[in-house]
Image: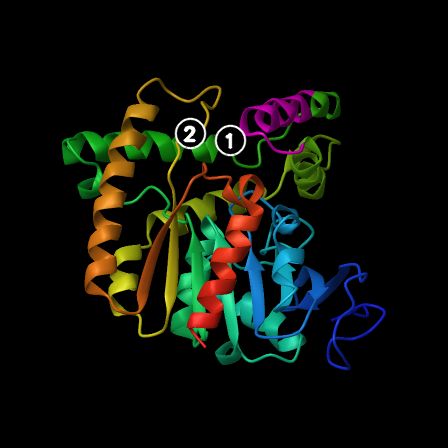
Amino acid sequence: MTEGMTEESPREGRRETTQVAVEGVCVAGDGVSLAVRDYGGDGPTVLLLHGAGRTLADWEPVAPLLAVRHRVVAMDLRAHGRSGDGTRPWTFETATGDAAAVLDSYGTAMADAVVVGHSMGGMVAALCLERGARAAVNLDGHGMGRPEQYVGLDAGYVTQRLAEARKFADEAGGRPFPAEALAGVLGYQASMAGQLGIAYALLEAGVRRSLGETPDGQLFLRPGRERAREAQEAMAGLDLFALYRRITRPLLIARALRPNPPVPGVPPWFDALMAAYTEGLRRDLDELARTQERVTVAGVDATHAMLLERPAEIAALVTRFVAASA
């Protein structure tokens, strides 16, 4: 860890409410720099992970609320935000190793931490249970699932559509754009903020933290194209429900109850596909909650952007779970 924590270290005494989060850097096992934001606090250690193509800035509305009762650190996943890319492909194994490295830098063993992730970060958090995490929270991190989860649709049709959706995501991930187009990117974020009823500044901060630059002076939103494709492949290859059925430590899974706003450029069949998946996911999570005693499932009245829409609700949900899993 390369920077001091705050004016008063949480290791020395109780954190004052006036303290400000501190940016820092931890080093992964292969030497990659991992950007972190330390919110201080006392109590059980909570490590916060963001989603694919996002950054630790997404946790800004939630983390200070958690720091009232927890020791809180957020990180930029490898190849995202201000963290390095490294030479390894992006895999879940590497991501969980990076999470362990950050915790170690703060003097916390994985066995003493609760890992909380949103979207792809939620998948990483769940996998940290197999790395020995005390407990984990997956906030709407379900990926695209499996064909049999798409209620009412033929599995062959779903397989075809999922391949098309992944191709669309691959083409969009890390796509370069001229510097003058940044205003349009930020304009889209402003539109999304209006639809979701959240502060534009939160989305702008995430975009600016994600900006990378190509050798010819164009911009892109990290991760770059290669790492973005690798992350998509990792998510497509992960059988989450097989993981859920074999875990032996407490896991909270939160599901968004409202559909996402329309996304420009997605094919016309996409919304119907996602509606079928949402129904299958509800069915399978309800069954999971009935059959797996270590798994708790909760619904959140929000879209996938629940961290930004319902920060107090998310903080309360996590706080109750951490206390119950002690």
Evaluate whether residue 243 shows in this view: yes
**Going 59% across and 56% down the picture, which residue do you hit?**
78
In the displayed structure, 109 sits above or below 119; it is below
Kind of residue sitting beneath label 1: Ala
**Going 79% across and 59% down the picture, which residue do you hit?**
20
- The quadrant of the rendering that contains the C terminus is bottom left
Segment tinted magenta in the rendering: 184-199
- Labels 2 and 1 touching (C-beta < 8 A): yes
* Disc 1 element: helix
* Disc 2 element: helix
Q: Is residue 165 left or right of residue 211?
A: left
Kind of residue sitting beneath label 2: Phe
Q: Nearer the viewer, residue 175 or 152?
A: 152
Q: Which residue is mark 2?
A: 168
Per the rendering, the mark at residue 172 is: 1
- The quadrant of the rendering that contains the N terminus is bottom right
Q: Nearer the viewer, residue 71 or 14?
A: 14
